[in-house]
Amino acid sequence: PNITYYRDPSLPQLDSEEEYRRGMGDMARVQARMIRDSSQAMRFPSVLIGNGEFTGNCSIGKATVGTYNPQCQSVQVNFTDGTLVYEEPIEVLTVLAHEYAHHLVNISLGSQSISGLENELVADCFAGLMHGYWDKYGKLTEAEVMSAAKMMIQVSKSESLSSADPHGDPGQRVGAFLAGALRTTGQQTAEYDNFCKGLDRIIDWNKGLP
């Protein structure tokens, strides 16, 4: 009931409403079970997915391919902002997971309590966690994982190759994503320690994946 979906007839390859709803349900299950602050376990975001033609004060329109509004506690992912266009549903799901993590940071710590770079890398780590969850249940192919990782490089402003960007450079972003995924299998890598320790303030790994 928290999800609003508007299909985009110009992008039929992305018209996978059931897949997006299932993926958001998976994120809600992870939140409900694993969030460290149990008082926030059922505090789910509202979610806008699709063509950007959403109404209401919480929508920023078509000028985004992914954003989180902390005041509205809403996630919005458009299939295109007019420049970047997602190629397949797994890319949309990965960005949904990234933006969902900003919600978890907001309700757990407050968005102003961590740096912009750490907030972005924690979100990439959580996106990796969700890929680990989906892999656990055989929902992903290797090609989908590679597609998601390549997409993260594309949207990380990789042309600057600068860690001064609050989203981090491509190495940081992909490292965080893969470290989050490996952590779901019990592997705590050096990349996890470098990029993902902030996730431990939000997620209690001892509770295990749903």
Image (cartoon, rainbow, N blue to C red):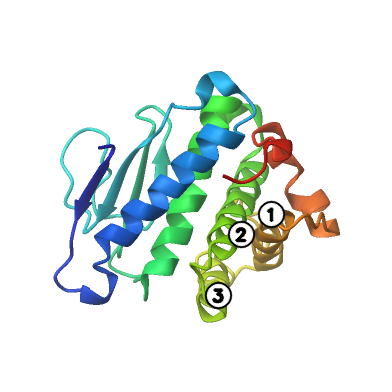
Q: Quadrant of residue 173?
A: bottom right
Dot 3: what SS? helix
Task: Tell me the amino acid under the disc marked 1.
Answer: Thr
Label 3 crowd bin: few (<14), some (14–19), many (20+), radius 10 Å: some
Dot 2: what SS? helix
Marks 1 and 2 in Cβ contact (< 8 Å): yes
Q: Position of residue 208 (x, y in %)?
A: 67, 43
Residue 13 visible here = yes
Residue 64 visible here = no
Distance CA(mark 1)–CA(mark 3): 21 Å
Label 2 crowd bin: few (<14), some (14–19), many (20+), radius 10 Å: many
The residue shown at (28%, 59%) is 18
Dot 1: what SS? loop
Which residue is identified by label 3? Answer: 150
Q: Position of residue 22 (x, y in %)?
A: 36, 53
Task: Tell me the amino acid under the disc marked 3.
Answer: Lys
Q: Earlier in the sequence, mark 3 or mark 2?
A: 2
The residue shown at (65%, 50%) is 121
Which of discs 3 and 2 lies nearer the camera? The answer is: 2
Q: Quadrant of residue 132?
A: bottom right
Which residue is identified by label 1? Answer: 184
* Residue 32 in the image: above or below residue 191: above
Q: Is residue 154 left or right of residue 14?
A: right
The quarter of the rendered structure image containing the N terminus is: top left
Distance CA(mark 1)–CA(mark 2): 6 Å
Q: Is residue 140 left or right of residue 132?
A: left
Task: Tell me the amino acid under the disc marked 2.
Answer: Gly
Which residue is identified by label 2? Answer: 132
The residue shown at (45%, 57%) is 95
